[in-house]
Image (cartoon, rainbow, N blue to C red):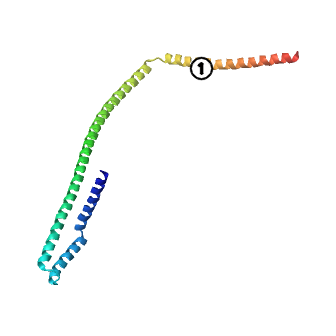
Amino acid sequence: MKKEKEKTEALEKIANGITWWVGSIPSLIVHTLFFIISFLLPMLNIVEFDKMLLILTTVVSLEAIYLAIFIQMSVNKSHEKIEDIQEDIEEISEDIEDIQEDIEEISEDIEEISEDIEEINEDIEDIQEDIEEINEDEDDEDHNERAKNVMLKSNVSSNKNEIKALKDIISQLQTEIEQLKKDNE
């Protein structure tokens, strides 16, 4: 199976090379020289004209047959490549359609999110208005009481810290006194 594929690929390369060569300037020159020499041979009495025409016609016919085969092989190969490209284009078109659908869905989601954000902003504005109204409605006495409570709490907290520090100092002094009593005994 693998050998057949390698042989086929080798034949295709040869066919492509021949097709390329036939369409080149060197091929034009070789064919022109061949025809000139073919017609010169009977003029120089090296070959009879009828034999030359028979051989020339046979060679040209065989060449035309093989060229037609090689050209058809190239056309078939090109057709296969075109079909592959068309399949790729169809797949790409499907992918593009999917992407467009995704973009439409994302756009819809963005619109919904924007609406939600607008609603949230409105709610925030309402809450701010409510807070301002509450602040306006409260008496100054309430503010003063709250301020006193905060100050008392902070004083209590700092007093607790001072009391703890004093207890530590008293404890340290008691330890030193006991140490001194032991030393005096």
Vertical arrangement, residue 55 with respect to residue 141, above or below: below
Q: What is the residue that sits farthest to the right in this orientation?
A: 185
Q: Secondary structure at mark 1?
A: helix
Residue 93, percent from left and from top: 24, 44
Front in this rendered view, residue 42 or 152: 42
Q: Position of residue 97 (x, y in %)?
A: 25, 41
Residue extending furthest toward the bottom: 44
Q: Which residue is mark 1?
A: 154
| Left or right placement of residue 11 versus residue 133 in this view | left
Q: Residue at x 88, y 17 (%)?
A: 184
Q: Residue at x 86, y 18 (%)?
A: 183
Could you tell me which residue is drawn at 39 percent across and 23 percent down? 127
Residue 38 can be seen, yes or no:
yes
Q: Is residue 140 above or below residue 14?
A: above
Horizontal placement of 14 versus 136: left or right?
Answer: left
Residue type at mark 1 is Ser
